[in-house]
Image: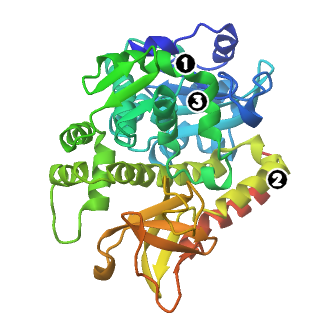
Amino acid sequence: MALQALQSSGVTFRKILSHFPEELSLAFVYGSGVYRQAGPSSDQKNAMLDFVFTVDDPVAWHSKNLKKNWRHYSFLKVLGPKIITSIQNNYGAGVYYNSLIMCDGRLIKYGVISTNILIEDLLNWNNLYIAGRLQKPVKIISMNEDVTLRAALDRNLKSAVTTAFLMLPESFSEEDLFIEIAGLSYSGDFRMVVGEDKTKVLNIVKPNIAHFRELYGSILQEDPQVVYKSQQGRLEIDKSPEGQFTQLMTLPKSLQQQIHHIMDSPGKNRDVEETLFQVAHDPDCGDVVRLGLSAIVRPSSIRQSTKGIFTAGKSFRNPCITYLLTKALSLLSACEMLSFDGHKLGYCSKVQTGMTAAESGGLMSDHWQCCWKLYYPSEFSKKLPVCRVFSSCCFIYQSYRRIGLQKQQHLCSLSSSPSLRQLLPSVLVGYFCLHCLFSKW
């Protein structure tokens, strides 16, 4: 079973685990402190360790942890374990993080999530937050015999493979596959725009190909829709409409619903299966899937990061971190509004394209970052790839040819001016940063 590749008996991790209440259905540790990463995060020795604890009864667990580790919590600790659990379950991505804790000489952060909420996320990708963490190599340090949880963990890995297949060409390398899988939970994540290293996914995958292979090898060998040449590190998949439809029908429920929402034209009221059948025959099927992922990840990442304002304890007393968080959350409008000649066409989601400078008439360099969206106004009812040329404007392409959506040399414009609703979290950040800097919690 693929999960066996994740298990570890690391003494360091178990010693840290001993500082917390024992009632855990699953405990794992992840990040650059566990698996080496390329780039700036390559210093494993001093890197923070990221833990996730899955518990059947969050109220009872937090009650015991408050007695053992009162100082780990923010000001919310005075509200008690029931309120903490309500915040954990009902806001953000269903996980409650305590950050920047010194434990056994190591800097750690740990998240607590309900077993039921984790199982739902693994099966349906409601948030693709902790489920996304578990699509990459992690060290499982404790797991009980919950058959439902184990089955959900396996299902999550298989769903990751299927989703990646839909965004890849007919033939590709293992590294291509693992990069797609590792990037699923970062699709649309606003932190990739304002906070994270843009090469984070590559930095995760390249030094850990063997770990990804160990995690996904058996799934690839057993999948009837793929030819897996493990010796050459190459794969071939069925990219026919029939093959893609089969894959789309096995996607997690939330991703199917997001794809349906994106593709279902107003007034048609088709069911999800009809929409997926249409997408399977669409040459841009992979881009549609990517937009569906972004629609799950973007709001989830924003809500969870906003919740971190309230749950963070000592971390807010660091002025540098305060500044970074304030700046990051002031740029919540990570997705830009696309408009043409005064008409708002929709939001713009960035995806890679292989368009060359020659195909674009010299207007753009090879492999430029492009984006596209389905537009509802009747004059823009077709699906149009949108290719950014300058910082404030873009050209719209169809079948890799520039089409006539210019009027008196005006190009469609990209605007990222945030609305009042989008600025509200930034105001809250500023308020609570000032509060935490001068309070004695």
Question: Tag 2 or tag 3, which sits nearer the N-term?
Answer: 3
Left or right side of 34 for 362: left
Left or right side of 214 for 229: left
Quadrant containing the C terminus is top right
Question: Tag 1 or tag 3, which sits nearer the N-term?
Answer: 3
Assign a secondary structure to mark 2. helix
Label 3 to label 2: alpha-carbon separation: 37 Å
- Counting from the top left corner in percent of width and height, residue 83 is at 53, 44
- Counting from the top left corner in percent of width and height, residue 13 is at 66, 15
- Counting from the top left corner in percent of width and height, residue 80 is at 58, 40
Q: Mark 1 points at which residue?
A: 211
Marks 3 & 1, CB-CB < 8 Å contact? no
Q: Which amino acid does label 2 sit on?
A: Leu
Q: What residue type is labelled 3?
A: Val
For the point 29% across and 17% down, the residue is 222
Assign a secondary structure to mark 1. helix
Q: Mark 2 points at which residue?
A: 437
Q: Residue 107 or 316: which is nearer the viewer?
A: 107
For the point 70% across and 32% down, the residue is 70
Q: Residue 119 or 31: which is nearer the viewer?
A: 31
Quadrant containing the N terminus is top left
